[in-house]
Amino acid sequence: MRVLNVFGFILFSLNCAQCQECLQKDITFENKEPVLKASYNDGETVKVNCMTGYTGMYKLKCEQGEWKTVVERPCAKKKCSHPGDTANGDFKLKEGSEFVFGATVLYTCKKGFEMTSRINLRTCRAKGWDNTLPVCEAVKCPAIHTDGGVTASGNTDMGSYGDVIHFECVSSDKKIDGSSEIHCKETGEWSDTVPTCKEITCKAPVILNGHVEEKTKEYQKDAILKYGCSEGFKIREGIPRCSKFGWTLKPECDEVTCELKPTTFGVKNITPEGKTVFRAGERVEITCAEKYWIFFTKEITKSFKCQDDGKWDYKPACQDIRCEVPYDQHVFSPRYYFSGDMKFGAKHDYACMSGYDQMAAEATCTRDGWTPKPLCVVKTCAAPDIANAKIVGKQRSKYNINSRIQYKCDPGFNPEQPVHITCNAQTEWTGILQCTENCGPPPNVDFADTTEMSKNEYNSGDKVEYSCFDKYTLDQQHPYSKYLTCEQGQWAGHIRCLKPCSVTVKEMNKRGIQLKWGKQRDMLSPHKDKIKFVCQRGKYLIVNELRQTCIDGVMDLPECV
């Protein structure tokens, strides 16, 4: 029984030891090399390397029967550098998109080149690309040989792909019969045979919508082709001449058309709408927008006709309405005032020349030109309206500045001689004398009479002098004077004779006064005359001053008692 127990213990110990091992088959990384042993004891470490052509490694440790990763750099394919470009060739990867271990590139030559290398592949190996770069060389064409009448220029000995040979005739009177140029093809053959030379001739062409005049089978070198076109078509510009390359100009008949260039500048409406090409005789109508008019006209709408020569009878376009510098409107220095913006709606200050009146503070550009119309008007004087007179000669409604005319007063009016008057720069008549009517005899004036014998008739402006009666005084303080004047058939002026003062002895005795000097007497004292009184003996003054002045017949006497 004891022996059995010992044996069981040994078996158990062996089984437990195996439980702690890690096995090679449990290492399952891809693209790795196998490890050396089939199993590893607990605590052992092992390095796992990658297969040839791969980079990376793993370091593992066995812990209680399981692999624990200590270092992990997964195995990846090695990368190769660029495989290299070959001159005149290309390459592409057969599979994948990276230059890595096992990748293969296939080289091909470009068009016109052929591969001279035996191998056209390169594969990425563990130590890099195998094989050498393939070589592509140009395809060769055989040498060119010509007869004595043809010269060839180019690589005629051994042409390479793409080479061009140019042929010309030795004689200028002949032309190449065949191709004047051939090229070396990618197949190693020339594109055409070597040409020969023949006499220069041209055949009569077939002209659509036209016909050849003086038609012949063949035309010699330098011959001119004469041709005409059907109605509605025109000969293309230039003269066709026979040359070694054929007709120098293709003889064609072009349809006569006029092109309406597409434009919206200033255009309001076009009829017919959308059409841009017009045949001879057809018309188009254009209407311009508000601030525009037909090119070089002052019309808003105009019809244009396509003529037989393919040109419009007038340019079908709109342009900005512009006003011109008003040189002919008597504006002072018009280029100074009218510069800059001259388009529709533009406004400019301006001044008029001497002798002309400005009609507005500023001028405005409109469809009808500058407004107001006119900008400046000549200064004039209206026909003078002089009462009781008539213009000598033919009378006009207006007279220019500096005009000089004369008039004559009607009979019975002064002046009797013709009067000359002038229209000045202020449009006023200067030198006018009114025609005045004559006056009759001068009027009677109280206490006065004329100093001369009066007449029955006086002219305008005549004066009559008056003098007052004895002891009366003439008042010459404004508005009085000693004259009356004949004006417009009426006597004008004011004359007044001031009264003297009457003082009697009876009145003086009644007031108890007497004259200071002289004998007591009755007296007549003129206007503004001063009299000195005194009280009679035994009396004293009770009223007024003793000295008094005569004022127009009134004198306040003093009184003594």
Image: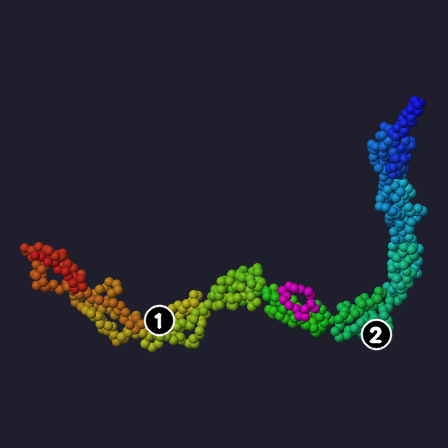
Label 1: which secondary element: loop
Q: Amino acid at mark 1?
A: Gln
> Which image quarter holds the N terminus?
top right
The residue at which mark 1 appears reads as 434
Where does the magenta region start and end? 259-275
Q: Main secondary structure of the magenta part?
A: loop
Give me the residue at 91% from left, 42% from top. 130
Percent of width and height locating residue 198: 89, 66
Q: Amino acid at mark 2?
A: Lys
Quarter of the image holding residue 39?
A: top right
Classify residue 401 by image quadrant.
bottom left
Density class for disc 2 (Cα within 10 Å; few <14, some 14-19, many ≥20) is some
Kindly give the residue lying farthest to the front in the view shown: 1
Precedes in sequence: disc 1 or disc 2: 2
The verdict on residue 273 being magenta is yes
Give coordinates of residue 538: x percent, y percent.
5, 55
Please tell me which residue lies in front, 181 or 152: 181
Quarter occupied by the C terminus:
bottom left
What percent of the width, then of the height, locates residue 230?
Answer: 77, 74
Q: Is residue 31 above or below residue 288?
A: above
Res 215 label: 2
Residue 264 shows up from this direction: yes
Asked if residue 242 is among those painted magenta in the image, a careful observer would answer: no
- Seen at 8% across and 61% down, the residue is 510
Residue drawn at 86 percent across, 48 percent down: 92
The one nearer the camera, 76 or 298, is 76
Asked if residue 209 lies left or right of residue 523, the reply is right
- Mark 1 is surrounded, within 10 Å at the Cα level, by few (under 14), some (14 to 19) or many (20 or more) other residues, namely some
